[in-house]
Amino acid sequence: MRLVILGGPGAGKGTQGEWLCQHLGISWVSTGDILRAAIAAKDSDGDCQTELGRQARSYVERGELVPDDIMIQFIQRRLSGSDLKAGWVLDGYPRTAFQAEELDFLLEKLNQHLDYALFLEVPVETLLARSLARAREDDTPEAIQRRLEAFQARTVPLLEYYEMKQRLLYINAELPIEQVRQEILEKLTARA
Ligand code: AMP
């Protein structure tokens, strides 16, 4: 199974997605985690070890989206990996309509298809409170605010994109974790 998991910062994409991967025996691909790891890996001069880390660093630190061309190239390499044959859940990708279209082109080339996009619906006030409580290194109030703005401006159009493709499943993600899991499984089973 191949899934995209959508939702604002703090919607529970990590919690639900990682569990879903274990449950379905598929791989977890979080672009945010991969970028953070690439940025954190430094050489002896304190520079990022990888090209990806160097390219993405300033954007991630400011809470801005990394440019599409960098992300598209990266995801192309990652999804072509032989370790992802059984399927995957993508967290943090696509973030823009352009990335979503490019993902479809890429999957066509790989002779694969996306099963569903899960949208974890959570009110903005809850997203804000959860992000502030998380206190990761890049979770400064300014970065959180920018990520929320980026989410609303650029990710919400993705919902229209996947709705149009009849691939979108709405999940009420304000509920407790167990209930959200249940709802995800029920909806995936109902549509299978
Ligand atoms: P996340 O943990 O998913 O909130 O991602 C953290 C940061 O990584 C974001 O604020 C962006 O700077 C960057 N990022 C992650 N995924 C993408 C993407 N698909 N497109 C652009 N930037 C991304």
Image (spheres, rainbow, N blue to C red):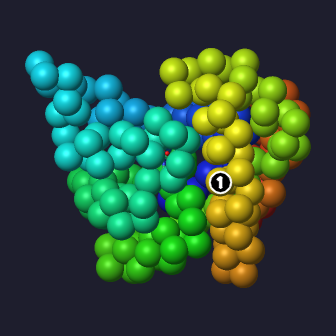
Q: Quadrant of residue 187?
A: bottom right
Identify whether 69 is placed above or below 151. below
**Quarter of the C terminus within the rendering:** bottom right
User: In the figure, is residue 134 to the left or right of 101?
Assistant: right
Observer-nearest of 163 and 186: 163
Q: Number of numbered discs present?
A: 1
* Pick the front one: 123 or 5: 123
Q: Residue furthest left?
A: 44
Q: What is the quadrant of residue 158 in the picture?
A: bottom right
How far across and down, in percent of the image, does residue 174 sit? 86, 36
| Residue at 51%, 74% in the rendered image | 98
- Left or right relative to 173: residue 39: left
Whether residue 95 is situated above or below residue 122 in the rendered picture: below
Q: Name which quarter of the figure residue 153 lies in.
A: bottom right
Q: Is residue 179 visible?
A: no
- Using the rendered image of the protein, determine whether residue 157 is visible from the camera's viewpoint: yes
Task: Report x, y in % for residue 127.
Answer: 78, 36
Q: Amino acid at mark 1?
A: Ala
Q: Residue at x 25, y 26 (%)?
A: 41
Q: Is residue 11 left or right of residue 123?
A: left
Residue drawn at 66 percent across, 20 percent down: 134
Q: Residues within 10 Å of mark 1 (few under 14, many from 20)?
A: some
| Residue occupying the point 32% across, 73% down | 110
- Residue 20's spot in the image, x, y percent? 59, 40
Residue 160, percent from left and from top: 74, 74
Give the residue pinned by disc 1. 150
The CB of the residue at mark 1 lies under 8 Å from ligand 1: yes
For the residue labelled by badge 1, is the local secondary structure a helix, a strand or a loop?
helix
